[in-house]
């Protein structure tokens, strides 16, 4: 398996987007882009799909809301039945604040857990540092390298696309 890559950095986001456009026209595979701040249109430029994290949040929130609602229903109708001033035992409107908060809590926890699992983060994760100043003041473009001739062509294409510094790591 070929794990070599080429990094190229830019100082301006417009140059980065133009460089990405030129590189994609030449058929070079882009592995990642690192930026010091969000860049509008970068996701479309590198061809990222829409995140599925919203689905994870929805299902986590749904599970949390169900757990919160069913727990309250069980407690107030079965486990700890108390008559509060003539209020019905199964008083759905009074369950809503806790149900909502449980939905928010489970949604947040499910998103954090999905994020950590997907990106293989957490205890013992080894960070990959492509360039020491990649998100300090530079925009870093990481492309897949090939054999020696292909790597030289990619480096030439990157320099023509306006890259300031180009490094090849095998």
Image: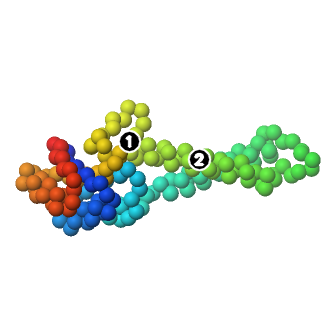
Q: Horizontal and vertical percent for residue 19? A: 24, 62
State the residue lying farthest toward the left: 149
Q: Mark 1 falls on what kind of element?
A: loop
Is 54 left, or right, of 41 in this rendering?
right
Pointer 2: what residue?
106
The percent coordinates of residue 10 (x first, y second) are 27, 54
Q: Quadrant of the C terminus?
A: top left
Which of the marked residues, 1 or 2, is nearer the chain's N terminus? 2
Q: Which mark is residue 84?
A: none
Residue 134 in sight here:
yes
Q: Nearer the viewer, residue 71 or 47?
A: 47
Q: Residue at x 59, y 52 (%)?
A: 61
Q: Toward which corner of the image does residue 157 lie, by quadrant? A: bottom left
Q: CA distance from mark 1 to mark 2?
A: 21 Å
The quadrant in which residue 48 appears is bottom left
Q: Are marks 1 and 2 in contact (CB under 8 Å)?
A: no
Which residue, as the protein is rendered here, is positioned at the far right?
Answer: 85
Location of the N terminus (image quadrant): top left
Closer to the camera in the image, 81 or 134: 134
Q: Is residue 34 visible?
A: no
* Label 2 neighbour load within 10 Å: few <14, some 14-19, many 20+: many
How many residues crowd mark 1 within 10 Å: few (<14), some (14–19), many (20+)?
Answer: few
Residue 58 shown left or right of residue 79 in the figure: left
At 29% from the left and 40% from the top, the residue drawn is 132
Label 2's element? Answer: helix
Horizontal relation, residue 86 to residue 98: left or right:
right
The x and y percentages for residue 39 are 39, 59
Location of residue 38 in the rendering, given as x and y in whole percent from the top left corner: 41, 56
**Residue at the location (54% across, 53% down)?**
57
User: Which of 25 and 138 lies nearest the eye of the viewer?
Assistant: 138
The residue tagged 1 is: 120
Occupied quadrant, residue 133? top left
């Amino acid at each position: 398996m070929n794990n070599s890559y080429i990094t190229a950095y830019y100082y301006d986001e417009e140059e980065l987007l133009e460089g990405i456009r030129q590189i994609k026209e030449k058929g070079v595979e882009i592995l990642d882009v690192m930026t010091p701040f969000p860049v509008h249109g970068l996701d479309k430029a590198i061809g990222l799909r829409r995140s599925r994290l919203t689905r994870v949040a929805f299902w986590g929130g749904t599970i949390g809301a169900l757990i919160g609602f069913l727990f309250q229903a069980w407690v107030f109708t079965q486990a700890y039945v108390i008559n509060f001033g003539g209020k019905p035992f199964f008083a759905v409107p009074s369950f809503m604040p806790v149900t909502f908060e449980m939905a928010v809590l489970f949604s947040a926890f499910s998103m954090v857990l999905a994020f950590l699992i997907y990106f293989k983060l957490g205890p013992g994760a080894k960070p990959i540092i492509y360039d020491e100043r990649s998100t300090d003041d530079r925009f870093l473009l990481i492309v897949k390298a090939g054999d020696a001739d292909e790597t030289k062509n990619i480096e030439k294409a990157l320099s023509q696309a306006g890259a300031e510094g180009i490094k090849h790591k095998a």
